Image (tube, grey):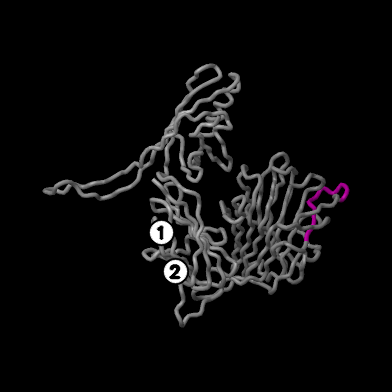
C-alpha cells in the first residue's frame, strides 16, 4: 500500500520515489507563506507606514518511516536517504497528491533516524523552500509579431517567463513588452540609416551528407588513412589499421571550399566527444583553415592523449608553428558536447572552446579562451578541413562532428545586424537568489546586447498583453510556470 502523502524527489536528472524505496510518508506539511514587512513609525502619526514587503523562505516538515527485512538493508536505505536529500543544488519535490505542482527545496543541518526495531525506523526532516512559491507545470504560449498577444496567466502570484524568439529575417533589434516594461537587445535604425552586416556566412554544413567534401593530403601531425561516414547527426571516423611500427597519430581527413576567400573570419565546429562512457583510450578532432594552395593557415584541435586518464586538451597552432598555451580542461569533464571556435581579426587570433549542456547541444555552460598576436600569418583562408585521429593501435574514443561553419568578419561602421534568419534568441527573465536573468543568442550568453532601459519583467496572474518586435521578422514562444502561494 502506498501512502497518500507519498512524493518524488528529482535530483540531477534522477527521480526517487519514496514508496518504491520502501519509505512510508507519515506527514507532509508546507508552512504558510513567510511574509516579511518593513515599517516606519512617523512621529505624531498613528500606526506605521509600510515601506517594503517581501516573501521569505518557507519550511516543509516531513515525517517518514523505514521498514526493511534486516539490519543491513535498513542501514543501506538509511544512507541512501541521506544521499538523496544532501545536495549542493536545490531539489525538486512532486507530491502524488498534486502531481501538477512542484516545490524547490534544500536540506540544511543534520538529522537522524529513531530506531523502532533493528530493521525499522522513523525520522523527521525539515526542508527549506528557498523559492517561496509552489509552481505548476510549464505552459507554452505563442506570441505574434504582427499584433499584440493576450495571455491569461494561471496562478495566484506573478511569475517570471522565458521567451524564445526564432529569427525569420536579419534584425538589428528584438523587443518584447508587457505594456509597462520591456526587454530589448540591439537598436532600431532610423529611416535614413542602412544596417551593416558585421558577419557574413561563407560556409555552413550540417554534416548530413558528403556533398562538397573532397580528399586532402594535408595534415599537421601524423598521417592520413581510413575514411569518414555520417549518420543523422554528423560525421564520424572509420579508422584503418595503422602503418606497421609507425607509432603516430593517424586517421581520415577531408576538406571543403568556402564560398569566398576570407581575411578576418570566425570558424567554428560543433562536436560530441565521449572520452569515458563509451570506451576507448585516445582521440583527436581537428579543424583546419587552408589557403588557396593548400597551405595550413591554422589548425585547432581537441584531444584526449593521456593513458589511463580520460580528459581533454585544446590548442591552436598557426601555419608558422606558433601555438597558444595548451589548455587542459577540468579533469572532471570526461564526456562533452562542445564548440571549437577560431577567430582572426587583423593580427589577433582567438581560440574558444565551449562546453554545451547535454541533451540540448545549444546552451553554453562554460567556455575557455586563448589568444595570439602575430603579423606573420596573414594568408586568406579559402578552405575548411576536418580530421579525426587516434594514436597507433590504441582503441579510439567516440567522436562525431555535428556542424561546421565559417563567417567573414567585415570591418564596418554603423548599426549592425545582431541576428539572421535561423538564429534563436532567448530572454530568460527568471531572477531569484539562485540565478540571474540571461540573454542568449544561439546558446551563447549575450547580456552585453541588452538595451540600457530594458528590464526583465514578470507576468501577472490573469490577463497580460504582450507585444513583439520587429514585425514579421521574429516569432516567439513564451514559457512560464504558474506560481501559487
What residue is shown with label 2? 148
Residue 21 on image: x %, y %: 58, 31
Q: Of the residues under marks 1 and 2, which one precedes in the sequence?
A: 2
Residue 101 on image: x %, y %: 48, 45
Q: Is residue 193 above or below residue 168?
A: below
| Residue 248 painted magenta | yes
428 and 458: which is toward the camera? 458
Residue in the image at 77% along x and 50% along y: 390
Q: Secondary structure at mark 1?
A: loop
Q: CA distance from mark 1 to mark 2?
A: 16 Å
Would you identify the image quadrant in which residue 129 lies? Answer: top left
| Residue 119 painted magenta | no
Residue located farthest toward the front when viewing the structure as drawn: 1
Residue 295 on image: x %, y %: 75, 66
Direction from residue 246 to residue 286 in the image, left or right? left
Residue 391 on image: x %, y %: 78, 48
Residue in the image at 64% along x and 52% along y: 337
Tag of residue 457: 1
Would you identify the image quadrant in which residue 125 lies? Answer: top left
Which of pointers 1 and 2 indicates the residue nearer the eye? Answer: 2
Direction from residue 222 to residue 426 in the image, left or right? left
Q: Is residue 337 above or below residue 92?
A: below
In this picture, which residue range is highlighted in magenta? 243-253
Amino acid at each position: 500500500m502506498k501512502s497518500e502523502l507519498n512524493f518524488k524527489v528529482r535530483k540531477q536528472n534522477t527521480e526517487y520515489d519514496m514508496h518504491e524505496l520502501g519509505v512510508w510518508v507519515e506527514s507532509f506539511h508546507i508552512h504558510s507563506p513567510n511574509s516579511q514587512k518593513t515599517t516606519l513609525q512617523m512621529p505624531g502619526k498613528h500606526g506605521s507606514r509600510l515601506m517594503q514587503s517581501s516573501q521569505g523562505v518557507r519550511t516543509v516538515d516531513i515525517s517518514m518511516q523505514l521498514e526493511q527485512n534486516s539490519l543491513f538493508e535498513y542501514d543501506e536505505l538509511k544512507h541512501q536517504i541521506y544521499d538523496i536529500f544532501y545536495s549542493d543544488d536545490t531539489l525538486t519535490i512532486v507530491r502524488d497528491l498534486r502531481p501538477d505542482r512542484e516545490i524547490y527545496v534544500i536540506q540544511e543541518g543534520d538529522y537522524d533516524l529513531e530506531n523502532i526495531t533493528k530493521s525499522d525506523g522513523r525520522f523527521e526532516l525539515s526542508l527549506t523552500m528557498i523559492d517561496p512559491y509552489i509552481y505548476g507545470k510549464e505552459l507554452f504560449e505563442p506570441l505574434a509579431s504582427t499584433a499584440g498577444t493576450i495571455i491569461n496567466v494561471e496562478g495566484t502570484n506573478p511569475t517570471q517567463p522565458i521567451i524564445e524568439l526564432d529569427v525569420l529575417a536579419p534584425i538589428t533589434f528584438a523587443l518584447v513588452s508587457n505594456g509597462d516594461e520591456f526587454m530589448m537587445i540591439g537598436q532600431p535604425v532610423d529611416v535614413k540609416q542602412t544596417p551593416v552586416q558585421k558577419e557574413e556566412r561563407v560556409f555552413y554544413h550540417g554534416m548530413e551528407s558528403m556533398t562538397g567534401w573532397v580528399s586532402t593530403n594535408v595534415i599537421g601531425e601524423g598521417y592520413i588513412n581510413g575514411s569518414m561516414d555520417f549518420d543523422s547527426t554528423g560525421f564520424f571516423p572509420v579508422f584503418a589499421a595503422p602503418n606497421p611500427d609507425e607509432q603516430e597519430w593517424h586517421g581520415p581527413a577531408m576538406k571543403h571550399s568556402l564560398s569566398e576567400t576570407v581575411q578576418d573570419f570566425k570558424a567554428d565546429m560543433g562536436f560530441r566527444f565521449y572520452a569515458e562512457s563509451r570506451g576507448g583510450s585516445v582521440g583527436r578532432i581537428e579543424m583546419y583553415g587552408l589557403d588557396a594552395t593548400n597551405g595550413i593557415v591554422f589548425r585547432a584541435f581537441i584531444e584526449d592523449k593521456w593513458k589511463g586518464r580520460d580528459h581533454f586538451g585544446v590548442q591552436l597552432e598557426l601555419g608558422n608553428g606558433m601555438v597558444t598555451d595548451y589548455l587542459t580542461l577540468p579533469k572532471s569533464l570526461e564526456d562533452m558536447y562542445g564548440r571549437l571556435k577560431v577567430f582572426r581579426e587583423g593580427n589577433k587570433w582567438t581560440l574558444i572552446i565551449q562546453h554545451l549542456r547535454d541533451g540540448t547541444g545549444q546552451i553554453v555552460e562554460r567556455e575557455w579562451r586563448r589568444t595570439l598576436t602575430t603579423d606573420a600569418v596573414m594568408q586568406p583562408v579559402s578552405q575548411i578541413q576536418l580530421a579525426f585521429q587516434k594514436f597507433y593501435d590504441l582503441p579510439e574514443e567516440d567522436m562525431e562532428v555535428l556542424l561546421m561553419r565559417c563567417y567573414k568578419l567585415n570591418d564596418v561602421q554603423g548599426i549592425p545586424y545582431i541576428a539572421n534568419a535561423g538564429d534563436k534568441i532567448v530572454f530568460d527573465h527568471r531572477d531569484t537568489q539562485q540565478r540571474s536573468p540571461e540573454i542568449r543568442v544561439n546558446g551563447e550568453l549575450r547580456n552585453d546586447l541588452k538595451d540600457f532601459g530594458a528590464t526583465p519583467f514578470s507576468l501577472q496572474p490573469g490577463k497580460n498583453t504582450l507585444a513583439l518586435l520587429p514585425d514579421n521578422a521574429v516569432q516567439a514562444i513564451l514559457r512560464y510556470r504558474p506560481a501559487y502561494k
